[in-house]
Image: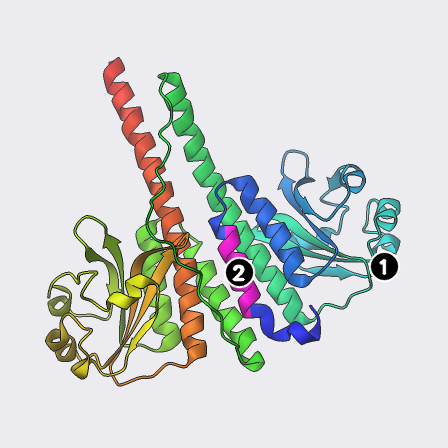
Amino acid sequence: MPQANANEYFRLFFETAQEILAARNLQETLDSLVQRTVVALDIKAGGLRLIVEQNNCLEQVAAFGLSDTYLSKGALNADQSIPEVLDGKPVCIQNAYQDPRIQYPDAMRAEGINTILSVPVLAGEKVIGVLRLYSAEPRDYTDEDIEFVSALAEMGGLAIANARLYQAEGDKLASLFEEIGVDLPIPIETGEQQFEACAFLPIDPLKSLGYFRTLHEVTRAILSTLDSKQVMQLIVDKVIDIMQLKASALRLRNETTHELELIVATGLSEKFLSKGQPHTDQSISATLAGKPVLITDTANDPRLEYPVETVAEGIASILSLPIVARQRVVGVLRLYSGEKRDYSQEEITVLSALAEISGVAIMNARIYEKTRNDLSFWTATLDYMQD
């Protein structure tokens, strides 16, 4: 990554994460990981290979910027083709066509590739493949560049693992419906107003790397499970730890009752939580229009639906963030401070990005749970009918 773009890690990670997580099937996830990484680093090409354990080969599953001739050059053996990567170590090779770890040096030279950066694709602690990035010119990657690419590869690995689980459940459900001669129901897209992704204001280059690391840490945590309740609890707990808050709560909107239903909370008393459900048109309503809202003094702000109870809870300031999934506001993430607190515009940008990534992760987990529950219901129903 050119030095002039050294302050772009945070923005690039957010944009890439959004596109990868929003992919609607496994192949789309694979393609998005490669293309977005190539574009982010402004390089010639990239390829993603996953390990086939039966024959110990690296199977090409996605590529961007590579010719058909190069892609058809032959299979890669995991033990011969830059094997250190499968031990979890990134490897950068300049003049790659002269390196003995390259299986097809002539093909690489003909393709106009000079430098390869190869990083492991991880799902948890397991290496499931390699992400390879190709440059036409000799290129030195900084430690921060390699950390950035490794974070993208790790995020992609977790997304791939989750997509595989989701696709497996979806395939089982489709097969079940086919068996009984019924078309699989197609989800109906909502016609609700759509919102733009969070706008990025300039971020101090000296802080961007730290913000990227924070976003990576949270993204890694919430992709570690497809249990939607666990995902949401992780979001709340992580944001309290990162921002040193008194408490935090996550609510999702109920389209029927127009209430913001509490899903998870940490640091709030049972008395405060039982005060009543906030209504979408009364409780800091601008958040539901897609805008972060900061209330620095809860004792004197008309936008609070329960001001007396809020002050009695010892909450002095609230930052209310929209949770956005596929350009729809689906809920709010609220950050509570025990003292009057201001947030910098940079902090609000980072937290808004966190909330947007969280929204996609929550919806993905809920779709997976619904598919799994539908499969369980229809399997049990058919078993009952056949008895």
Task: State which quarter of the image contains the C terminus.
Answer: top left
Task: State which quarter of the image contains the N terminus.
Answer: bottom right
Instruction: Rate crowding at label 2 as few (under 14), some (14 to 19) or many (20 or more) other CA atoms within 10 Å.
Output: some
Name above or below for residue 63 compared with residue 196.
above
Three-letter amino acid code at the position of disc 2? Glu
Residue 86 relative to residue 375: left or right: right
The magenta segment is 10-20
SS assignment at label 2: helix
Q: Position of residue 330 (x, y in %)?
A: 31, 55
Report the residue marked by disc 1.
Answer: 95
Report the residue marked by disc 2.
Answer: 15
Please identify the dominant SS of the magenta region.
Answer: helix
Which of the two discs, 2 and 1, sits closer to the camera?
2
Verify whether residue 351 appears in magenta. no
| First reached walking from the N terminus: tag 2 or tag 1 | 2
Tell me where residue 358 sits by quadrant: bottom left
SS assignment at label 1: loop
Q: Position of residue 196 (x, y in %)?
A: 43, 60
Q: Is residue 226 visible?
A: no
Tell me where residue 338 sits by quadrant: bottom left
Q: Is residue 20 visible?
A: yes
Q: CA distance from mark 2 to mark 1?
A: 31 Å
